[in-house]
Amino acid sequence: MRNGKHKQQGVAYLGLMFVVLFMGMMVGTYIESWSTTAQRERETALLWTGNEYRKAIRNYYELSPGGNKQYPKSLDDLLEDKRFVTVQRHLRQRYRDPLGSKDDWTLITDANGQITGVASSSPRKPLKIANFSPENQDFKGRQHYSDWKFVYTPSATQTGTPGTPPGINPGQPPGPAPQPGK
């Protein structure tokens, strides 16, 4: 009898081991899924935040008084632009890097040390590598979040003023553009 009881205990022990193994795999799958979801959320936050910085830098540059276009010297200049009689705010607050530990953006500067853009300091590999919005097309295929550079570069063909939808030129009535040579 004793031998049969040991066999039953062995089978029960083996069954319990399979249950524990299965539960461990399920927990591992859940954690991996949760981690991927969290990274996608941080990625989305990075795209939004980086584009907010790019827009603020664009506004700072394009609204430069006296026609002397210049970029900000610090991110604080975007919060309080003191070049005008009344303080202008191009950004509501300093945003932290969603993938970094704090407000540790990598600043992208021109030859004069003025800030033209920001980038995350994260060396992690992005989940998103395609299907970016038009202003972020340069991010396609990039290997690290730090390669996503939110830079404002003025364009000679750009019309309108900051805050105006593309293709609309203030002071010009809406409608078809005049044809050249007519």
Image (cartoon, helix red, strand yellow):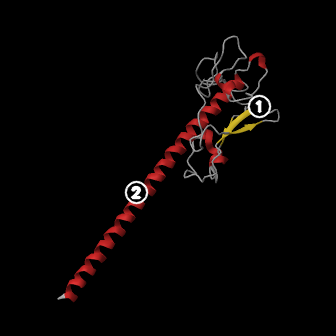
Q: Indicate whether 83 appears above or below 13.
A: above
* Rendered image: mark on residue 114: 1
- Dividing the picture into quadrants, the one containing residue 49 is top right
Decide if residue 150 is in sight here: no
Residue 59, image x, y percentages: 66, 25
Q: Quadrant of the N terminus?
A: bottom left
Disc 2 or 1, which lies upstream in sequence? 2
Residue drawn 33% across the image and 73% down it: 17
Mark pair 2, 1: CA separation: 45 Å
Disc 2 packing (10 Å; few <14; some 14–19; many ≥20): few
Residue closest to the far right: 111
| Helix, strand or loop status at disc 2 | helix
Residues at marks 2 and 1 touching, judged by CB atoms closer than 8 Å = no
Identity of the residue furthest to the front in this view: 2
Mark 1 is on which residue type?
A: Gln
How many marks the image carries: the answer is: 2
Residue at image location 67% in from the left, 38% down from the top: 118
Type of the residue with mark 2: Tyr
Place of residue 168 in the rendered image (x, y in percent of width and height, measured from the top left): 61, 24
Residue farthest to the top? 85
Which residue does the image show at 74% across and 17% down from the upper left?
65
Q: Nearer the viewer, residue 93 or 53?
A: 93
Residue 79: mark in rendering = none
The quarter of the picture where the C terminus appears is top right
User: Element at badge 1?
Assistant: loop
Q: Residues within 10 Å of mark 1 (few under 14, many from 20)?
A: some
x, y percent for residue 144: 64, 51
Q: Position of residue 107 (x, y in %)?
A: 71, 38
Please give the residue where the numbered disc 2 appears in the rendered image. Answer: 30
Q: Nearer the viewer, mark 2 or mark 1?
A: 2
